[in-house]
Amino acid sequence: SCERLFRPDLRSRPVGVLSNNDGCFVSRTNELKQLGVAMGAPYFQVKNICDKNKVAVFSANFSLYTNLSDRVMNTLFEFTPSLEIYSVDEAFLDLTGFDEKSIIDYCRHIKETVERNTGIPVGIGIARTKVLAKIANRIAKKEESTRGVYSVLMKDNLEYALNRVEIGDVWGIGKQNTIKMKSIGIHKAKQLRDFKNDQLIKKYFTKTGRMIHDELREYSCFPISDIQKKKKE
């Protein structure tokens, strides 16, 4: 998104950003993902695909990305004093007090303001917990009908999202835990939410796994932290 901001001609072309030594892809547009280029894929292995499909490939410009990230976060601070900057391109906002309808309108306003002020497109997921917000955000980014904002505060939307998201795409579930969960029949986020054996979850996936399980059931275990830690990456 940062590279496209200064190159409008790239809006419909696949774009990828390489790591510091130009070795592997660390960021990909949806168009590049659709070509089968995976996150972390070594450039030399997919160079033919990139050349054939006229992929715009950039070396990482972290000073530019950080500068634009700061602009996005400063815009978000205008909408709530309680904001956790989770990474260079992610943040959690506390919007307690809104009802189900007004919060969607408010988030559309946030999205439009960020894009107008910075030129960076964003997706917003609305939920009662962080894990569910990440799931909602995934739907917001992948499905055009959402127009970039999706709420799982409503039961029907929640069930739809949990049925759509693979267990390996749930925030906090790594590759090894994905394999373990599939071995006990958990393939979708909904199956983990509905899994009845809390002790088994804690035994195999530790306290964090149990907390993710609770977050999927709308019990908040990861509160928003207003204390911003200096990121090393």
Image: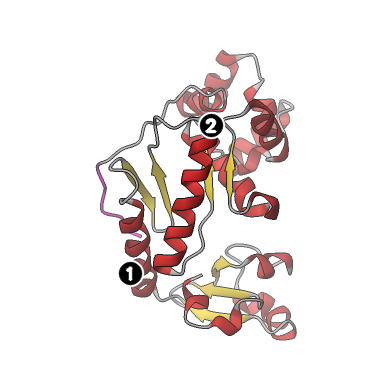
The residue range painted magenta reads: 227-233
Residue that carries the numbered disc 1 in the rendered image:
67
Tell me where residue 85 appears, x and y as whole percent. Answer: 35, 49
* Residue 60, visible in the rendered structure: yes
Residue at horizontal 40%, vertical 36%? 95
Vertical arrangement, residue 10 with respect to residue 76, above or below: below
Please check the rendered image and state whether residue 34 is part of the magenta-colored stretch, yes or no: no
Tell me where residue 223 appears, x and y as whole percent. Answer: 37, 31
Badge 2 crowding class, 10 Å Cα cut-off, few under 14, some 14 to 19, many 20 or more, is some
Q: Earlier in the sequence, mark 1 or mark 2?
A: 1
For badge 2, the amino acid type reads Glu
Q: Nearer the viewer, residue 196 or 72?
A: 72
Q: Nearer the viewer, residue 219 or 167?
A: 219
Tell which tag, 1 or 2, sits nearer the viewer.
Answer: 2
Question: Where, by quadrant of the figure, is residue 220 drawn?
Answer: top left
Q: CA distance from mark 1 to mark 2?
A: 33 Å
Q: Secondary structure at mark 2?
A: helix
Q: Nearer the viewer, residue 105 or 158?
A: 105
The image's colouring method is secondary structure
Tell me where residue 75 appears, x and y as whole percent. Answer: 34, 57
Tell me the number on the disc at residue 214.
Answer: none
